[in-house]
Image (spheres, rainbow, N blue to C red):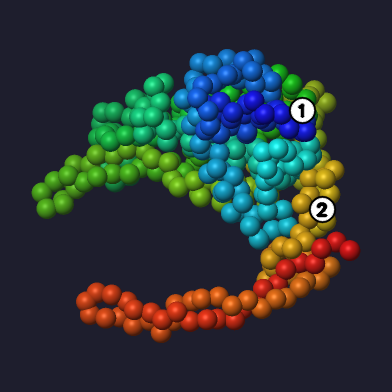
Amino acid sequence: MNFFPSGICFYVSVAVCWFPKVHASWWYMGTLGSQVMCDNIPGLVNKQRQLCRQHPKVMQAIGAGMKDWISECQHQFRNHRWNCSTIGRDQNLFGRLLLRNSREVAFVYALSSAGVVYALARACSRGELDSCSCDPTKKGPSQDAQGPFSWGGCSDHVEHAVHFSQAFVDAKEREERDARALMNLHNNRAGRRAVKRFLTLECKCHGVSGSCSVRTCWQAMADFRHTGEHLRRRYNGAVQVAVNQYGTGFTPAHTHFKRPGKNDLVYLEDSPDYCIRDQDSGSMGTGGRLCNRMSRGVDSCEVMCCGRGYDTSRLSRTVKCECKFHWCCAVHCRDCQQQVDVHTCKGQT
């Protein structure tokens, strides 16, 4: 057990860090150590602690899958002022961003919930967990637009993963039931629905000369990139809301806003502009970030640098050039030096 100024970390079969002001302690799961010490993780509520004790291998699968959804978050926002940057283990994973109720937090909750479903369903299909395997309901004859087929292979058991995610990820929000908890629950559900949205039917043909007179099919999750791109579009159209008078749901924060649907992301307060480093708002700032001088989009130097200007440096890089195909079968290239201009945003003055 290590003590840091801002929290406590337990490095066990999953490494879990607790930080007093962070809303989702399960995000600090990793794959270190030798045994699960769920009772000693102060960041978990009773329901989460109980599930952690009962399913240590599931906790490991969740921890192992974290790098995938964090990487996807950073990919989706790589060219934006807020780039889903994380901070070292001795501080909050996303800094003080999580203290806000912004659309960025909405996206992170939705994507992390989706990531749990994806990681668990994948672990089930790979036979890595004792508690689940392939989807047992996908068996016998069935039919789609192309005709009859028989269930076979290994269908991803997404429903099982969704059920566990609801029980584990949502447990803390269900206890609190305040405005922030309602926001998180809604976005968690939207994330889980996003994974189910991209389930595909994959088939193998059988028959004489590939006639495909008989098909064996299974249901598989699409690459997680599809989920990330879908939730990114939902982020763009996220709805600012207020809690209704009964404290049970949402109403649009402004009369001209649409009422949010089940697949929409919702948030409660405006985002900072992320231009300057500000610990109170969770902004890392854009000083030193790369920008594109020729772009007119969000990655442009004008937008990324927030009007502060940018510095230009010339770098030399090695590229392949004068490539020729040689029969048979190789391509031979020369290494050439290329001069490129790199633009980075000026810092706060």
Q: Does residue 110 show up?
A: yes
Residue 21, percent across and down? 78, 31
**Disc 2 and disc 1 in contact, CB within 8 angstroms:** no
Mark 2 or 1, nearer chain start: 1
Q: Which residue is mark 1?
A: 20
Q: Which residue is mark 2?
A: 277
- What residue is at 69 percent from the left and 66 percent from the top? 290
Disc 2 packing (10 Å; few <14; some 14–19; many ≥20): some
Q: Residue 320 versus residue 154: which sits nearer the camera?
A: 320
Say which element carries label 2: strand
Q: Is residue 139 above or below residue 302?
A: above
Q: Is residue 295 left or right of residue 205?
A: right
Residue 261, percent across and down? 65, 38
Residue 299, percent across and down? 69, 65
Q: Amino acid at mark 2?
A: Arg
Q: Is residue 35 above or below residue 205?
A: above
As measured in the structure, the alpha-carbon distance from the residue carrying label 2 to the one carrying label 1 is: 22 Å
Q: Is residue 35 left or right of residue 312?
A: left
**Quarter of the image that includes the C terminus:** bottom right
